[in-house]
Image (cartoon, rainbow, N blue to C red):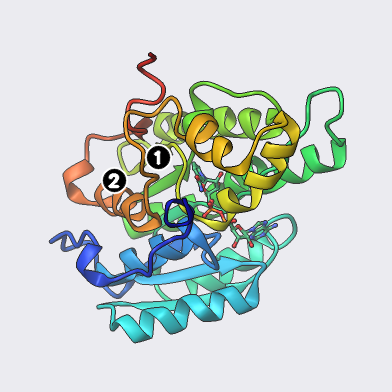
Amino acid sequence: MSDQISPPEPTTDDFLVVDDDRFAPERVCLVTGAASGIGRATALVMADNGLTVVGTDVDEEGLDETAETAAELGVEGSVETVVGDLREDVPDIVEEAAEYGDIAYLANIAGMQHIDSIEDFPMAAYDRMQEVMVRAPVELSKHCLPHMRETGFGCVANMASVHGHYVTSDKVAYNVAKFGLRGLTQSIAAEGEGEVRAFSVSTGYVKTPLVTDQIPDTAEQRGISVREVVEDVMLGQSRTTEMMTPTEVANLFAFGFSKHADHLNGGDLRFDDGMTLTYE
Ligand code: NAD
């Protein structure tokens, strides 16, 4: 089971690289949550597409590791880093990102999980999650949109989840946040005036620390074993028994940002192995 929950090392062979003139070093792709998991993978993939990626996160050490990995892999573009807390520093983060070039792409990926029933859910945890996973993406969009309009085009991508389509118990803040992100995506599409697009990405479980860290809590909450959490709770509704890798998710951002997705606006890339559309 351990190989089902440990993320593989990223290699450029697995990266989706799209031939797109807009993926150029003078263009900035701002990626949140870039110190870990899906955010790190997206930073690496978008940099390999030739963009200047500005990765931001509260975790300075993790961000350094992302930049080091980019250098080790020899990606085509570059990964710059800006340390900041999405609950307080959004205007400064965008201002710093704009110093590296024209902001054209924004990937809202940072997130977290808290598991408790509605009755027991600590409101401080609820507020924190809404601030990081909904308010910050709105505020980042607010500050990036003028740059995108100035650049002449732009695209905002929001990391949603199967939990933005259907829900499971004990994750009320997460469920509400992911439904909210889809609302933001459609709002940007409504106001983008053909210059700025938006889309969301919804996946099932991905091999990242966010998932591996919640397995023991879920096991305790449901009174079942760690193995049962992975096989029955996480992959039980899925038509495959393998979780997605962070790179596979990052590749969806590369496609969604590219010219091949020019007609994707307000929509969702739901890659969930059939999880939300089938049952046994
Ligand atoms: P992760 O825990 O590996 O990474 C999340 C990152 O967000 C961390 O680096 C963390 O430091 C950062 N972050 C948290 N609070 C922050 C704050 N206040 N300011 C700045 N950065 C902050 O998680 P992941 O699995 O890569 O998840 C990334 C996103 O993908 C989340 O939005 C998550 O909901 C979503 N998602 C994950 C899965 C999955 O199975 N892993 C599935 C669907 C959706």
Residue 208, compared with residue 57, is above or below; it is above
Q: Which mark is residue 201?
A: 1
Instruction: Give the farthest residue toward the top.
Output: 280
Q: Name the residue rendered at 54%, 30% in the picture.
A: 233
Residue 186, compared with residue 279, is above or below; it is below
155 relative position to 82: left or right: left
Quick one: quadrant of the C terminus? top left
Q: Position of residue 18 (x, y in %)?
A: 17, 59
Q: Which mark is residue 256?
A: 2
Q: Name the residue rendered at 78%, 37% in the picture.
A: 126
At label 1, the amino acid type is: Val
The earlier-in-sequence mark between 2 and 1 is 1
Residue 137, compared with residue 232, is above or below; it is below
Q: Name the residue rendered at 36%, 50% in the picture.
A: 249
Tag 2–tag 1 contact (CB < 8 Å): yes
Kindly report which numbered mark, 2 or 1, lies closer to the viewer in this rendering.
1
